[in-house]
Amino acid sequence: MTTLDSLITVHDFERRARELLPVGVHDFFAGGAGDEITLAESRAAFGRWHFRPRILVDVSGTTTRTTVLGHEVALPVLIAPFSVPHLAHPDGVRAIARAAAAVGTTACLSTLSDASPRQVAAAVPDGSHWYQAYWFGRDTGLTRALFELAAEAGFKAIALTVDTPRLSRRERDLRNRWAPPADMVVPSLLEASGGRFGNPAEMVARLTDTMTWQDLDDIVSWSPLPVVAKGILTAEDARLAVEHGVAAVVVSNHGGRQLDEVPASIDALPEVVEAVAGRVEVLLDSGVRRGSDVVKALALGARAVLIGRPTLWGLACGGQAGVERVLELLQIEVELCLALLGVTSPAEVTRAHVQPARR
Ligand SMILES: Cc1cc2nc3c(=O)[nH]c(=O)nc-3n(C[C@H](O)[C@H](O)[C@H](O)COP(=O)(O)O)c2cc1C
C-alpha cells in the first residue's frame, strides 16, 4: 500500500495514479490532441531554460506568497479547471476546493464538474474560487445564467475558455472507445437551465463555434465578475484580449489537448508578456510539474501558474489529502528554488534569473 508520504514529487503521483485509474479514465486525463507533440513539448520546453542564481543574499525570510487579481495566495500556483474530476475520486471538485482552501490558493471549477458553484461554496465557504465558462452562443441565456450562479456563490472570477471553437480529437479516447458516463448529471447546467438539462452531451451540443471578439466585448460588459481569457498563445490575441477588457490572460495550450503542434506555453509566454505590457496579469498553464517550472514562468513574466493534471493525480491518489500534498510539494519546491536563486518572494523574480540553456 502506497502512502501519500512516500510520494515526494508530482512525477511520483503521476506514476501512482496510472496504476490506480482504469485505463480509459487515465488516458482521458493524461492524453492530448493528435500526435501529442504539444503535450510532450510542454514539458520539454521548461528544460530549455536554465537559472541564473545570485548568491550571498539573506534568504532566511523567503515566502511563496503573492497575489492574483488582488487576492492573496499562499503560493503562485492555482488549480486549473478540468472536467469530470469525480472520475478520479468520488469527492470530486469539492475535494479540490477543500484542498485549495487548506493550502491557501484558488481553485477554478470547470463547468463540467460534479458540483455547482452554489454547492462548492456551501461545502467550502472559506475558499477562493473561480468558475470556468464556455460560450453557448448569442441566443441563449445559458452563458449568462452560469456567470450569475458563480457570482451569487461568491466566486471571484470567470475563466472564459477561448481556445475551444471545436473540441479536439483525442485519439486515445477514440481508441479506448471512452466517453464520459452517458447518465452523468452536471449540477451547474441543471441549475442554469432551470432543470431543463444537465447532461454533458446536451451541453456539448449547445457549444457553438461562432464566438468572436465582439462577443467578448458583450460578455465583459454584462459579466458580474472579472473575465480571464484562458487559452491565449500569441501577442496579437493577447493585445486584443486586453483591448476587449479582460482582467487577465492565461497563456495555455489547454494541456496539449486542443490544437496540436502549437508551442509550449512557456515558449509563448515572453511574446504575450511583452504585448500585454503590464496592463493585466498574465498567468500560464500546461506542463507545470515542478517548483522550478513555476519559478521559470515567474521569471518570464507570469504572475502565477495553474496546474491541471497534477491536481488530478493528487485526487486519484488520495482525494483532498492527495491534492493538498501535491500543492504542498510544489510549495516546498518553489520556496527552495526561490531561496537558491537568491530571492525572498515571487515578486523579486525577474527575467535576469533565467537564460536559454546553452548545450
Ligand atoms: C482531463 C482534463 C479536462 C479538462 N477540462 C477542461 C475544461 O473543462 N475546461 C477548460 O477550460 N480546460 C480544461 N482542461 C485544461 C486545463 O484547464 C488546463 O489548461 C491544462 O490541464 C493545463 O495543463 P496540465 O494538465 O499540463 O497542467 C482540461 C484538462 C484535463 C487534463
Image (cartoon, helix red, strand yellow):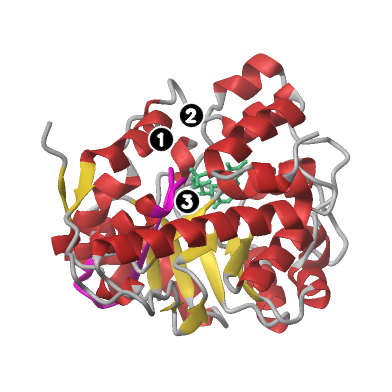
* Residue 38: x %, y % from top left: 38, 32
**Horizontal arrangement in the rendering, residue 17 relative to residue 298 (left or right):** right
| Residue 223, image quadrant | bottom right
Judging by the rendered image, the residue that carries numbered circle 3 is 210
Judging by the rendered image, the residue that carries numbered circle 1 is 259
Which span of residues is magenta-colored? 276-291
Residue at (25, 68) in percent of width and height: 349
Element class at badge 3 = loop
Is disc 1 in contact with disc 2, using a CB cutoff of under 8 Å? yes
* Residue 156: x %, y % from top left: 58, 79
Instruction: Looking at the picture, tell me which residue is in the foreground, 231 or 122.
Output: 122
Instruction: Looking at the picture, tell me which residue is in the foreground, 233 or 205.
Output: 233
Instruction: State which tag comes first along the sequence, 1 or 3.
Output: 3
Is disc 2 in contact with disc 3, using a CB cutoff of under 8 Å? no
Judging by the rendered image, the residue that carries numbered circle 2 is 33
Element class at badge 2 = loop
* Residue 276: x %, y % from top left: 23, 69
Q: Is residue 73 above or below residue 47?
A: below
